[in-house]
Image: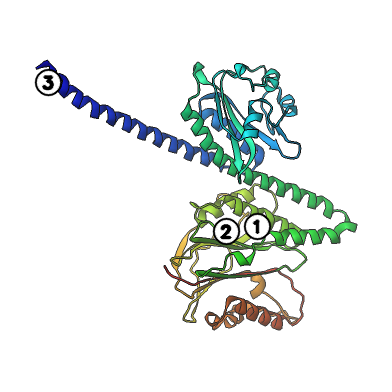
Amino acid sequence: MLYLICILFCATLIPLTLYILKNNEKNRELTRTKILFEVSLQLNSTIKKKELLQIIMSTTAKVLNAEASSIILVDKVKGELYFEIATGAKENEIKEIRLKIGEGIAGWVAQTGESIRIDNASSDARWSNKVSSKLDFPTKNLLCVPVRSRGEIIGVLQVLNKQRGAHFNAMDLQLLEMIASPAASALENAQLFEALEESILSLKETTAVKERMERELQIAQEIQMSFLPQKQFVSTSAAELESYLKPAKVVGGDFYNYFYIDEDRLFMTLGDVSDKGIPAALFMAVAMTLIKGTMHAEMEPADLLYSVNNGLCKDDSNMFATIFCGILNIRTGHFIYSDGGHCTPYIIRNTGEIEPLAVIKSLPLGAFPDVSYHNQETMLQTGDTIFVYSDGITEAENAAQKQFGTTRLLQSLANGQTITLQALLQQLIIQVEAFVDGAPQFDDTALLMARFSANS
């Protein structure tokens, strides 16, 4: 009888044990997913490099229950690792420290591209006390992983000393590797933004020198045009796109951009900065950088405008930009969009009808922080065309100070569904120039057209 009871007990205990283990694994996976989501939110909260590095350090230390964390960047020119930021009384001394690639554990990770977990740092042959001796901070155990961007190691991320005397485990190392991936993406965007700010500052300084103004304007024009996408990459069997930009001066504030955010969805935007010339071009460059750096696959147009608007409001520029942006699914024709005080776009239907796109107007970018923007949706049929433009077209004036206007615009778009977008663009520009008849251009001009070509 006792034997039978033991058999029945084991038969019950084994499935229960397996269930508990499986359930614990699911809970650990859920917890890890939640942690990575929260870390990603933290990393996307700023595009400023120094703020981002501080967030990476504090977040990884907290998530992995470590006494400290550091991110050390790679100087590709000198082949060294350096500390961009440091905290505490010896901040300046830490910033002076540089490690050769291959020197110390961090240098070894940067050289080999391999992650490492060490339980006793001082006994490891690769250990270097160059940093700890400066800080008077004994390192007991650590994790160190490479930070990669586009396949290239741009730094290493490490956490030091597990709290309460414990050791890091393999799951800790795997979690740190997962954190390093979004950290690399956020860091790349921050570095691009920092480079842009440095370029803008340099441009502002050089434009103050009158004898160099002409050359600087040429450089500014080249920089501005380099922000615009190449047309060739977007035309497919499912979508056709055409764009146009003509500043009133050498450089201007009108802008457009488009790029695929995934295999099926095409993002597009067009905006108009309130000023002209170099100030508008600088504001336009910052806006375009924020748009490209902020937009991701899970974001909708209204959320993008909200985030970019708050980013622009941090700079006291006294300028703003009207904007329209949307996401076109090139397989289904679904189009979701949002408006920031811009000219109402049109849809040229495949039947020849021209319809104003229903929009809920909101404030332009950079006017006030925490403005609400709204998503709206429509469906395009095969041959339907989205037409977005700046007021430089409708407000183009002739010598008698008469404007081209909306009526002439719609007449120029008539029968647009029967010709290519390139032909439609040329037709419109010819008619605007004929109306103006050589009168000076007082406003920047931009337009963007996207034709949906296939339903799935």
Label 1 sits on what residue type?
Answer: Phe
Please give the residue where the numbered disc 2 appears in the rendered image: 363
The residue shown at (62%, 67%) is 232
Picture disc at residue 339? none
| Alpha carbon separation for disc pair 1 and 2 | 9 Å
Q: Is residue 188 above or below residue 68?
A: below
| Alpha carbon separation for disc pair 2 and 3 | 78 Å
| Image marks 1 and 2: residues in contact by CB distance under 8 Å | yes
Please give the residue where the numbered disc 3 appears in the rendered image: 4
Identify the residue at the far left of this view. Answer: 1
Please give the residue where the numbered disc 1 appears in the rendered image: 320
Relative to 441, 296 lies left or right = left
The residue shown at (49%, 72%) is 453
User: Which of the marked residues, 1 or 2, is nearer the chain's N terminus?
Assistant: 1
- Other-residue count near label 2 (Cα within 10 Å), few / some / many at <14 / 14–19 / ≥20: some
State the image quarter where residue 185 is shown: top right
| Alpha carbon separation for disc pair 1 and 3 | 82 Å
Q: Horizontal and vertical percent for residue 196?
A: 71, 49
- Other-residue count near label 1 (Cα within 10 Å), few / some / many at <14 / 14–19 / ≥20: many
Q: Say what secondary structure mark 3 lies in.
A: helix
The residue shown at (65%, 63%) is 255
